[in-house]
Image: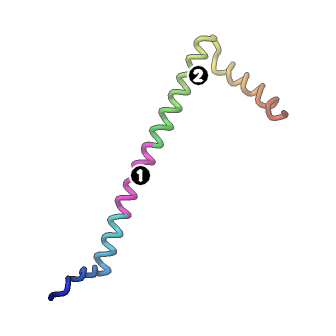
Amino acid sequence: MARPRTKARKSYEELLEENAEKIRKHTEALQGLERERKELLAAKRDEEMAELYRYMQETGLSAQEILDSIQKTKPEQMAS
């Protein structure tokens, strides 16, 4: 009866090539996630700015008036 064939061992070069390919794939995935994060942060910022602008339009406040108000309340909040 014949013995079953054993799996041929891969050379170090083949293993290194496979490893490099895995690193490349994961690097691409990471870069894609970083791009997506930047896009999400930009969308969040734009939405928040639009909300702030709508509030300014509704109340008739200028950007300087908003900043002055924030700067006045900030020291009071830090004391408590």
Q: Measured from the top left, where is residue 16 in percent x and y?
A: 34, 74
Q: Where does the magenta region start and end?
A: 23-36
Give the numbered dot on residue 52. Answer: 2
Label 2, label 1: how many angstroms apart (C-alpha)? 32 Å
Describe the colour scheme in one phrase: rainbow
Q: Residue furthest bottom?
A: 1
Does residue 3 appear left or right of residue 69 in this picture?
A: left
Classify mark 1: residues with Cα within 10 Å, few (<14), some (14-19) or many (20+).
few
Q: Measured from the top left, where is residue 15 in percent x and y?
A: 32, 75
Q: Quadrant of residue 70?
A: top right
Residue at the (59%, 22%) spot, across then down:
52
The amino acid type of the residue labelled 1 equals Gln
Q: Quadrant of residue 74?
A: top right
Is the magenta region chiefly helix, strand or loop? helix
Answer above or below: position of 76 versus 5.
above
Does residue 17 appear left or right of residue 55 in this picture?
A: left
> In the rendered structure, which disc, 2 or 1, sits on the residue that comes first in sequence?
1
Q: Quadrant of the N terminus?
A: bottom left
What element does badge 1 sit on? helix
Q: Measured from the top left, where is residue 50 in percent x and y?
A: 53, 22
Q: Measured from the top left, where is residue 61 in percent x and y?
A: 65, 14
What element does badge 2 sit on? helix
Q: Is residue 30 magenta?
A: yes
Q: Nearer the viewer, residue 23 or 58?
A: 23
Answer above or below: position of 5 versus 71.
below
Q: Quadrant of residue 63?
A: top right
Quickly name the residue at label 1.
Answer: 31
The amino acid type of the residue labelled 2 equals Leu
Classify mark 2: residues with Cα within 10 Å, few (<14), some (14-19) or many (20+).
some
Residue at the (80%, 31%) spot, across then down:
75
Give the numbered dot on residue 19. Answer: none
